Amino acid sequence: MIMINKYVIQEQQGSLYNLATIEEISGGSREFMRDMMQLFIETMPKLADDMVNSLNSGNWAGVKSVAHQVKPTMELMGVTSLKDDVVVIEKNAQNLTDLDIIPALVEKFYAVIQKIVEALKTEIKFYL
């Protein structure tokens, strides 16, 4: 079982994500921006929990599935700090290789997602 929140986030909040892509896609629509942030806030913590639960139960297919599922959202939200980690989690869980490194990567993923969600809860207020 992994210990959540042990991972120390080294990055500044502003560099945890970048809204430039959704801003471009939105065509300047504040409502679209708000909706995308709200969707992240509502879905990513559940997916992070699912990844942790899959890891803790040894469900490597579940770990792989969640990692695969979060990649497009993270790309859209400019979460570059986790991109390589999620690729490694997905590949290793799928191939059942180097499984010993996955817990630390999942812990980092979980912690960073929590930080981003908290930052977005503050930032979304500017899009009301």
Image (cartoon, rainbow, N blue to C red):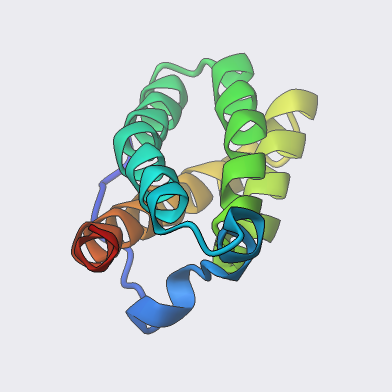
Asked whether the viewer can see residue 10, the reply is: no
Closest to the observer: 1 or 85?
85
Compared across the picture, whether 73 is left or right of 95 comes to: left
Compared across the picture, whether 5 is left or right of 71 comes to: left
Asked whether the viewer can see residue 119, the reply is: yes
Compared across the picture, whether 30 is left or right of 61 comes to: left
Number of numbered tags placed on the structure image: 0
46 versus 22 height, above or below: above
Closest to the observer: 18 or 84?
18
Question: Which quadrant is home to the C terminus?
Answer: bottom left
Percent coordinates x, y for residue 73 in the rendering: 58, 43
Question: Which quadrant is home to the N terminus?
Answer: top left
Percent coordinates x, y for residue 96 in the rendering: 73, 27
72 versus 28 height, above or below: above
> Residue drawn at (68%, 29%), measured in percent from left and top?
93
Percent coordinates x, y for residue 10 in the rendering: 39, 81
> Residue drawn at (44%, 55%), measured in percent from left and top?
33
> Residue drawn at (64%, 26%), measured in percent from left and top?
64
State the image quarter where residue 14 is shown.
bottom left
> Residue drawn at (56%, 43%), measured in percent from left and top?
102
Percent coordinates x, y for residue 43 in the rendering: 38, 32
